[in-house]
């Protein structure tokens, strides 16, 4: 019995220690912009260790923004490893990246994961871009969750910084 309890405690401690690399991902506040193309870089402010896959869900206002393109500036995250869906759900886009080798990639703080291009229709209208941390989809039966995992399938602890365009009134 004592041996079983010790093994259980050691297992719980090792799970606690191995779970939870930390990362902070940010979308910018663009301020006042004219109508037309606007670009939101998705940037690591902080990242600990390597990652093998992630999915990013972003909510936007369909009355003022329409996603049209994604730019992939990082050689660590090449275009052929991405899958995106601009019309995942009304006002929601999903960006998924998966390492083609299945091995961890090691981004640095300040690295840009991707740049999302939107058409901005209503000049000077305030429109937030918000991360979806975890919620049920209104249009599908799936759960939407922004998350990062490493090659051992350990999930990162995330801090997500929302972005916006326009000036709140």
Image (cartoon, rainbow, N blue to C red):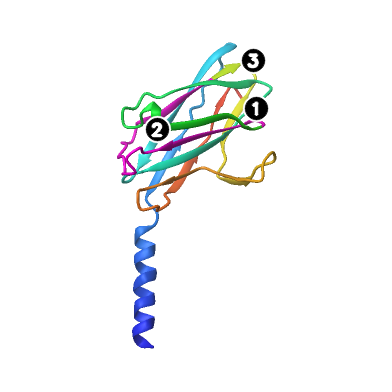
Give the numbered dot on residue 2. none
Q: Is there any visible trace of residue 132 in the rendered image?
A: yes
Horizontal and vertical percent position of residue 126:
63, 23
Q: Is residue 139 above or below residue 75?
A: below
Badge count? 3
- Say if 137 sits above or below 4 in the image: above
Is residue 29 magenta-colored? no
Secondary structure beneath disc 3? loop
Which x, y percent locates residue 3?
Answer: 34, 84
Residue position marked by numbered label 1 in the rendering: 61
Q: Nearer the viewer, residue 24 or 98?
A: 98
Is 102 displayed left or right of 33 in the figure? left
**Magenta region:** 90-117
Q: Quadrant of residue 11?
A: bottom left
- Residue at 54% across, 14% down: 37
Q: Give whichever of discs 3 and 1 has the lower sequence position.
A: 1
Mark 1 or mark 2: which comes first in sequence?
1
**Residue 166 appears in the figure:** no
Mark 2 and mark 3 lie on one chain; the one further toward the N terminus is 2
How far separated are the C-alphas under marks 2 and 3? 31 Å
Q: Which type of secondary structure does the marked residue at label 1 adopt?
A: loop
Give me the residue at 67% from left, 41% from top.
Answer: 140
Q: Position of residue 168 (x, y in %)?
A: 62, 26
- Tell me whether the residue at label 2 lies in contact with that at label 3, contact meaning CB atoms closer than 8 angstroms: no
Secondary structure category for the residue under label 2: helix
> Label 2: which residue?
81
- Residue wearing tag 3: 121
């Amino acid at each position: 019995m004592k041996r079983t309890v010790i093994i259980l405690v050691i297992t719980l401690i090792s799970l606690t220690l191995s779970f939870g690399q930390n990362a902070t991902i940010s979308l910018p506040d663009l301020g006042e912009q004219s109508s037309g193309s606007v670009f939101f870089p998705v940037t690591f402010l902080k990242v600990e260790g390597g990652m093998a896959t992630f999915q990013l869900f972003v909510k936007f206002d369909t009355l003022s923004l329409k996603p049209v393109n994604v730019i992939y500036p990082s050689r660590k995250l090449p275009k052929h490893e991405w899958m995106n869906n601009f019309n995942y759900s009304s006002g929601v886009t999903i960006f998924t990246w998966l390492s083609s080798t299945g091995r961890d990639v090691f981004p640095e703080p300040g690295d840009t994961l991707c740049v999302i291009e939107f058409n901005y229709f209503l000049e000077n209208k305030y429109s937030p871009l918000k991360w979806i941390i975890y919620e049920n989809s209104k249009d599908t039966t799936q759960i939407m969750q922004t998350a990062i995992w490493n090659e051992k399938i350990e999930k990162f602890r995330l801090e997500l910084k929302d972005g916006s365009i326009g000036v709140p009134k």
